Image (cartoon, rainbow, N blue to C red):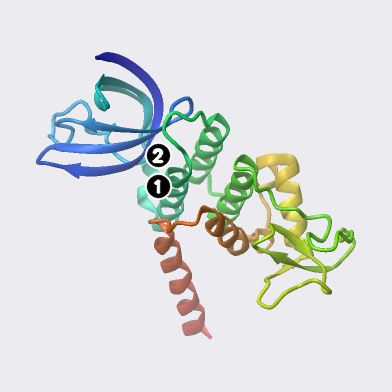
Amino acid sequence: MRQTESTAIVLRAVNYRENDRMLTLFSPTRGRVEALARGCRRPKSPLLNAAEMFALGDFELYEKGHHLTVTGATLTETFYPLRQDFDRLACGTYLLSLCESTIQPGQEAQELFMLLLHTLSRLTFTDQPWRPLLAGFLTHYTACEGFRPRLKHCVRCGRRLEDQETVWFDLREGGVVCEACRGAGMPILPRGQRQWLEMALTHGSAAWVDTPEMYAPLGLMQRYVEQRVEQPLRAAGMLGTIEREERQMEKDES
């Protein structure tokens, strides 16, 4: 039996019994942590706000055997404004879901943790469009997880493609291909989107700010990442709902 403390963000909160909740925490030093928050759903519980998705803070954990219980928490941020905008909430929930599918218990993930917090902060406290933010997160996520897209040479024949106006993207191989090597169904990667990816990978989040949404290859990066994750993300449907509603609005307006 021991008491520990860990800085973490709540990735998932599932109601358990009458007043409890099972929390999935993301700690930069401990990876994924599953812990029970007893009595947190009572109106006067000191853990009420800390046992919600997106809650960031220092969590006091009591360990007995292989079970962890949250005994206290000092909140740093709740990212509450996300709940006032469905599109941004869907995007933020998707980020949490992706991190949950990636991190492992006991495995340090400092870089991914900071990437998540940085993106959530911009998503919550700036008016920057959410699509470039999500595209930027996914692009840097690939670098964190070791499958950064290759953008300068054809991944099949090795031909240099920096001067090519249009290339295609091989989702399986993780990089651009020339016209001679492209296979059926490979998505086109326009020059503007390829340059955006190169800037995002080279200059970090500075490339995400004030860039036209048309240059952010969100759909491509989402397909690429989800193929590598190889498991359904529980929040992907929320993003799909947004896309369907927007297509319907465009159709109605025309």
Horizontal and vertical percent position of residue 215 = 69, 60
Give left or right: position of 223 versus 83: right
Q: Which mark is residue 172?
A: none
Q: Secondary structure at mark 1?
A: helix
Q: Position of residue 169 (x, y in %)?
A: 71, 65
Q: Residue at x 69, y 57 (%)?
A: 174
> Between residues 235 and 36, which one lies in front from this camera angle?
36
Q: Mark number for residue 79?
A: 2
Of all residues shown, which one is farthest toward the front? 65
Asked if the residues shown at circle 1 and circle 2 are in contact, with their CB atoms under 8 angstroms apart, the answer is yes
Q: Is residue 224 above or below residue 59?
A: below
Residue at 46% across / 77% down in the picture? 249
Q: Position of residue 140 (x, y in %)?
A: 63, 44
Q: Which image quadrant for residue 46?
A: top left
Residue at horizontal 57 percent and vertical 62 percent from the top: 223
**Total number of numbered discs in the rendering:** 2
Q: Residue type at mark 2?
A: Phe
Q: Amino acid at mark 1?
A: Leu
Q: Quadrant of residue 11?
A: top left
- In the rendered image, the residue lying farthest to the left is 18
Q: Which residue is located at x 62 percent, y 47 percent?
A: 142
Q: Residues within 10 Å of mark 2 (few under 14, many from 20)?
A: some
Residue 130 at x, y = what percent? Answer: 53, 54
Crowding near the residue tagged with mark 1, few <14, some 14–19, many ≥20 C-alpha atoms within 10 Å: many
Q: Please name the residue that numbered disc 1 is placed on.
A: 82
Nearer to us in this view, 128 or 57: 57
Q: Please identify the quarter of the rendering in which residue 184 is found.
A: bottom right
